[in-house]
Amino acid sequence: MVSELEELSLLIGDVYDAALDPGLWSHILKRVCGFVGGAASGLFSKDSAHQSGEMYYKWGDDPEFTQLYFNKYVSSTHSRLHIFSSTSVT
């Protein structure tokens, strides 16, 4: 059985692999959810100057929730750090 630390190390390595092979992101985001106990995850950028953002990769999301999330957090100049998952950090 793989320890939690070993699983995290493998997951981090897979994130680096996905940076080189974007086709891996959906699978990696699913694994991230499994590791943290989340229901959905996504990788997006935020442009604070223009109060906009763009979703690049996602897994398990509800499009309606994602739109609400972007409307509340991504388009706000007051937010600084948000992790898109069922367990968000603000």
Image (spheres, rainbow, N blue to C red):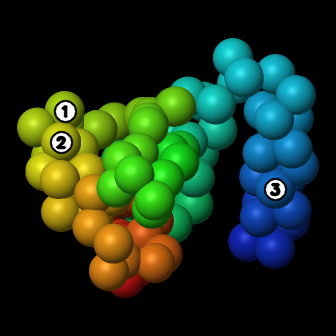
Q: Could you tell me the amino acid type at mark 1?
A: Pro
Q: Could you tell me the amino acid type at mark 3?
A: Ile
Q: Can residue 42 be seen in this view?
A: no
Q: Nearer the viewer, mark 3 or mark 2?
A: 2
Badge 3, how many Cα within 10 Å: few under 14, some, many 20+? some
Residue nearer the viewer, 79 or 20: 79
Badge 2, how many Cα within 10 Å: few under 14, some, many 20+? few
Which numbered disc covers residue 12? 3
Whichever of labels 3 and 2 marks the residue nearer the N terminus, that label is 3
Quadrant location of the C terminus? bottom left
Residue nearer the viewer, 19 or 31: 19
Image position, residue 25 (x, y; %): 64, 31
Q: Could you tell me the amino acid type at mark 2?
A: Gln
Q: Mark 1 points at which residue?
A: 63
The kind of secondary structure element at disc 3 is helix
Which numbered disc covers residue 67? 2
Quadrant location of the N terminus? bottom right
Whichever of labels 3 and 1 marks the residue nearer the N terminus, that label is 3
Image position, residue 78 (x, y; %): 32, 80
Asked which quadrant contains residue 9, the reply is bottom right
Q: In this view, does 39 lie to the left or right of 54?
A: left
Image position, residue 6 (x, y; %): 86, 65
Contact between labelled residues 2 and 1, with CB atoms less than 8 Å apart: yes
The kind of secondary structure element at disc 2 is helix
